[in-house]
Image: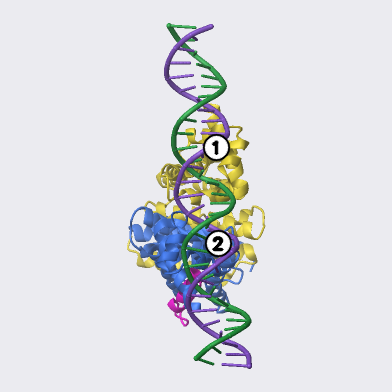
Chain colours: A blue, B yellow, C purple, D green
Amino acid sequence: MEAKESSILDAAEKIFAEAGFDGAKVSDIARAASVAEGTVYLYYKNKQDLLAGVVGRFWTQLTLGAEEAIAPDTTTAMQLEQLGRYHLQSLLNQFEVVSLTYRARPQQEQDLDQVREYVRVFDRIMQRGVDRGELPEHIPIVQLRDVFFGTLEFSARTLKLRERPYDHSVVTNLLSIMVTSPDTPSGMIQGAIQGKEPSNRELMNALKAIQKQLKTSGN
Amino acid sequence: MEAKESSILDAAEKIFAEAGFDGAKVSDIARAASVAEGTVYLYYKNKQDLLAGVVGRFWTQLTLGAEEAIAPDTTTAMQLEQLGRYHLQSLLNQFEVVSLTYRARPQQEQDLDQVREYVRVFDRIMQRGVDRGELPEHIPIVQLRDVFFGTLEFSARTLKLRERPYDHSVVTNLLSIMVTSPDTPSGMIQGAIQGKEPSNRELMNALKAIQKQLKTSGN
DNA sequence: TACCAAAATGAACCAGACTCATTTAAAATG
DNA sequence: CATTTTAAATGAGTCTGGTTCATTTTGGTA
């Protein structure tokens, strides 16, 4: 039966999430899934492998949700904002399961693949932005991917630590420093603007810099 | 004896780093430290607490090293670059110990404190930048801190995954999107510049944006 | 040297992951 | 249907490794 496997996964996710990996007993998971302890081991080699199953499924589903959350026919900046919002909300809503990911990493390669699949959503958005001419040709996508996901993950931890809910300014600030749109000449400046008033000195600095750049660059 | 406690920590760090938390046996650690198994429990409540000790010491030492790595009398951008270089190098050189941090998190608050102490190095640099007038007044330091450390941690993972050594462009790119210096009007643009040629179209866009900004903002 | 408190020891204990001989259910065969 | 074959499920028992604690050793003091 296929249904049994996923019922074991469901039980495992529940128990892992509420007790943590070490705190969860395989016997508890078996009971929650209404099977004998030995049955779990027919489907998963060991407890680690079971965790890998839970984590892998989570990221697969997250990928599906991400594809849905992104409007295909809009600007790159808008798509990044949608992905950012979706990602941060998911991290916050399912914080425990996300945390389990770190427990799975070293072992099974399998669930790393799922994570890899997930980050490709970002790569596709950026690549399309380049193809459309919305982004410079030689933009370092891989490094920006680390900026994007790294920032969101640390922001999620910060919010959890301070027991704060989802905060959209995290996403907009992140985008303002990543994407140069007509309205956001620079991340730092943008941050200051939304904090209070725009600082003319900062704007002038940036302006002069660009003018110098234009003059000195040969093309 | 105080020396015995740190010799146990040394042994634990070594064994944890090479075998992982689960793979490390307390009996192995005890043998490596040349004490009996029970002696370990005189100094640490349990295996988790021992891990917290290792992790806590690591971050404390990292903080000391960071303070040293930063020249006190230089620009904010330079100090951030120094901290970034130091941090990324440390993450790469001691990747295993850093990974152990995640295993310690949920439990003991103690070692979280050490991590908190570490990130304050960043806060101090930024705050000084504001005080000196190098940075806008209302810069969102806490969010930028997540950008800084989140990006570096994810970049370190990416480099490890691809078995690449320290890459300074990670730090410079990060700074270019975080800090608006005279030479880096915008992160995206800067990325394109160092990738190949500067894109005039991008520069013009940013220029026009700033001009518009200057006109429309009342002050 | 005798005494004491603190430090150290490691055999024994025990929780919990994992195994496997046995049972039960399902499918195939005639 | 009855019978054989195959697969799935069971849970009592094994075993590993973290933790405890009665006993021993150490180092200082009278």
- The front one of B9 and A10 is A10
Callout 2: SS: loop
Q: Position of residue C6 (x, y in %)?
A: 45, 23
Magenta span: predominant SS is: helix
> Mark 2 and mark 1, same subunit?
no
How many residues crowd mark 2 within 10 Å: few (<14), some (14–19), many (20+)? few
Q: Position of residue B209 (x, y in %)?
A: 45, 68
Residue B57 showing in the rendered view = yes
Residue A208 showing in the rendered view = no
Chain of the residue that carries numbered disc 2 in the rendered image: A
Residue type at mark 1: give it: Glu
- Indicate which label's residue lies in the foreground, 2 or 1: 2
Q: Which residue is mark 1?
A: B68
Inspect the magenta stretch and tell me whether residue A65 lies in it. yes
- The front one of A193 and A6 is A6
Chain of the residue that carries numbered disc 1 in the rendered image: B
- The front one of B52 and A158 is B52
Callout 1: SS: helix
Determine contact: label 2, label 1, CB under 8 Å. no
Mark drawn on residue A46: 2
Q: What stretch of residues is rendered in magenta?
A: A56-76
Q: Quadrant of residue B163?
A: bottom right
Specify the quadrant that holds the C terminus of chain A: bottom right
B214 sits left or right of A38 in the view: left
Q: Position of residue B72 (x, y in %)?
A: 51, 38
A159 sits left or right of B169 in the view: left
Residue type at mark 2: give it: Asn
Inspect the magenta stretch and tell me whether residue A213 lies in it. no
Q: Residue at x 57, y 68 (%)?
A: A116
How many residues crowd mark 1 within 10 Å: few (<14), some (14–19), many (20+)? few
Mark 2 vs mark 1, CA separation in Å: 46 Å
